[in-house]
Image (cartoon, rainbow, N blue to C red):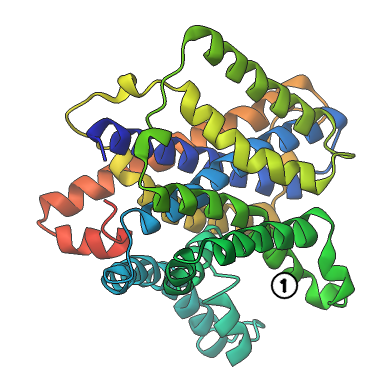
Amino acid sequence: MKKATSIKIGVFSFIGTLIIAAYHLELVFYNYLSVSDSTHEILVESFEYIACVAMSFFFMKSGFLLYRNATKENIGAKLKRRLFTLFVPFFLWNLPFLFIKLFQQFILHFDSEISIKKVILKLTLFPYNGPLWYVFAIGVLCFIAPIILIIKEHKKMFMVMVGSVLALSIFIYGFNGLRFFIDLSDSNQAYIEWIERFFRYLPCYMVGSLLGMSNHEHFLELKTNKKNKLCLICMSIIISIVWIGFRNSLANYIKLLFLFVQPYIIWIIIDERLFDNDKESEAIKCSFLIYAIHGIILNVITHILEKKPLYELLPFSTTTVLYNATIIILPVIFSAFICVICIAIRKLLLFCKLKSVLSVLTGSRG
């Protein structure tokens, strides 16, 4: 892979991480509002769309990097390395929450009931550090890699498998197919949301995997003339307007199509020559730290807002334009603040010659 392509992937990951961090704070604010007007709902939907595109890129990138140059002979070593760099940070960033819960129940005697089932779920599907659900999902997808590489040698069977995955995703996420098999009661709602979210991004992972298996990296290095680039920009804007403008009536299967088309369109639009640098910046190397730490800070902010809602903390009415502007600005400030903290943490660990600790905390991504 060209150095510029590698740096471009890093920059996209960094920007995507900041977007998701901002979206999560926006979501927390939205959940603790006293008033919700149409303007704010549009802002929330816009944040959600941008964050979904960012998450789509993450799944696409993960599939591409796993299957790039993968063979039946080397997939074992690749999986061993990938699973270690996914699950070790995943558990390390969740265990502190578990220790706090245990301390609250057995030392402080809070009314927070802990069961083995709940702990298992909180260390897998529904992590204490919520944003890391993506890391666990990617880890689960790794286990099918050897099967996919075997099927790949049989073209017809491989095409059937790809078509089946796409059809299953459209059925489950696009047409709410789980209602035919699962009781849609409140007790199952969390499981349903996780499965639907998983299948929302599965086609993106599949597209990335196919690009990785093709061994033709010109798909990542496409250059377009000004006319084609303008057409792609217009297409990207139209997709965005349709998603946000018809947010209440747009079918999920259309959203599914948009989610694995839009990241690739944006990738082509951004010229690779912008990334002809010798090395990545310090901020880009902090992407995983930002992603993990923002989940911890989100928990703190949620606890604050549970005791004192946002509308009581701000000095103006929830119906003013200034209020909606603040809801846009605060998530951006939040993301920038997390970025500064993570850069400082990374520099401190390196200064203290604790590069191995940084490597474990980030899965060798920092």
Does residue 106 show up? yes
Q: Position of residue 287 (x, y in %)?
A: 37, 45
Label 1: few (<14), some (14–19) or many (≥20) C-alpha neighbours in 10 Å: some
Q: Is residue 356 left or right of residue 289?
A: left
Vertical side of 263 occupied by 227: above or below:
above
Q: Is residue 279 left or right of residue 333?
A: left
Residue lying at 24% horizontally and 48% vertically, measured from the top left: 346
Q: Position of residue 62 (x, y in %)?
A: 44, 54
Among the 4 quarters of the image, the one containing residue 179: bottom right
Residue lying at 33% horizontally and 61% vertically, measured from the top left: 70
Where does label 1 land, which residue? 191
Does residue 220 show up? no
Q: Position of residue 263 (x, y in %)?
A: 55, 36
Looking at this view, is 62 or 160 the one in front? 160
Q: Position of residue 15 (x, y in %)?
A: 45, 35
Quadrant of the image for the N terminus?
Answer: top left
Vertical side of 121 occupied by 115: above or below:
below
Q: Is residue 86 left or right of residue 199?
A: left
SS at mark 1? Answer: helix
Looking at this view, is 143 or 302 the one in front? 143
Give, as a three-letter code, the residue at label 1. Answer: Tyr
